[in-house]
Amino acid sequence: MLEFVQTADGSKTIYNPEVGENYHSVNGALQESRHVFVNSGLNYFLKQNSSILKVSPAGGDLEGAGNHPISILEIGFGTGLNFLLSAEFCAEKKIRLDYTGIEAYPLDIEMISQTGYDQYVCPELWQQFIGNYNRSLLSATKLNTYCKLQIANCKLLDFNSKEEYDIIYFDAFAASRQPEMWDEAAISHTIQFLKPGGVFVTYAITGNLKRSLKALGCKIEKVAGAAGKREMLRAVKIDSPKNGKSESQ
């Protein structure tokens, strides 16, 4: 049975006994989500693409992205914490967000409602998320002026889309618990959905992951990890592997 666990920063995560793993770091679910995904992924992408999106590279008030929405694909939607913090960030900056999460085993709305994540976002966003959660499992759903959410209820290798995304949040369970989510087939399937110039971020960094991403035309960067981890990985897609170009570091 799934059970709630309080993490070091006071935020909750969920322990899955079948996998033997928590959905987030016990060193702090909230700080991990903010550091790995929002700051190292979303905010980094915005700064790197300030000329296109008309945002401030200095990190001050970000001007809205006009008619160009930011698109994010999350592998492992889980509790929705990464989505909520990203949606709040974009709404504050008046940036439109198209967010797709892949989740093979969605949590029910009752458990989502008990996460306590309502205290980390504005009440309106929380109610829009809770009120549209089940609908977003069926189709892309507009939550508000700035945000559209779709949760693809399928396994990673069964996910298919004509869309390419600006950012990929890779938030699967650890490779020691779910090695099939981190093998070459899974990573290759994931990277095909990333736009050239797009950013891939994850909380982990392994030799196999670095080699797979380099072979797929990505430039790898080691970034300081969230609490409890020395390093995390960020990658930028430089080129398609079919062109025979990949950049190593």
Image (tube, rainbow, N blue to C red):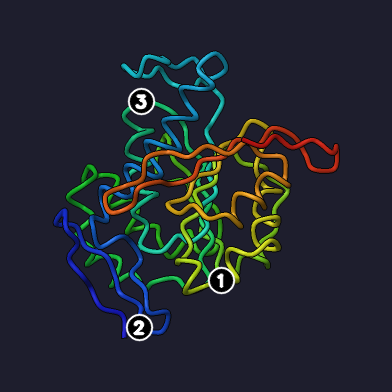
Residue under label 2, please give it: 17
Q: Residues within 10 Å of mark 1 (few under 14, many from 20)?
A: few
- Callout 3: few (<14), some (14-19), or many (20+) C-alpha neighbours within 10 Å? some
Q: Which mark is residue 179?
A: 1
If you read the primary sequence from the N terminus, does the residue marked by circle 3 or circle 2 appear first? 2
The structure residue drawn at horizontal position 51% and vertical position 56%, both measured from the top left corner, is 101
Q: Nearer the viewer, residue 215 or 18?
A: 215
Q: What secondary structure is marked by label 1?
A: helix
Percent coordinates x, y for residue 206 in the rendering: 53, 55
- Circle on res. 105: none
Q: Position of residue 192 (x, y in %)?
A: 71, 48
Of 224 and 171, which appears nearest the observer?
Answer: 224
| In the image, residue 211 above or below residue 6 | above
Who's the residue at 37% across and 40% down the image?
Answer: 224
User: What kind of residue is marked 1?
Assistant: Pro
Task: Name the mark on residue 93.
Answer: 3
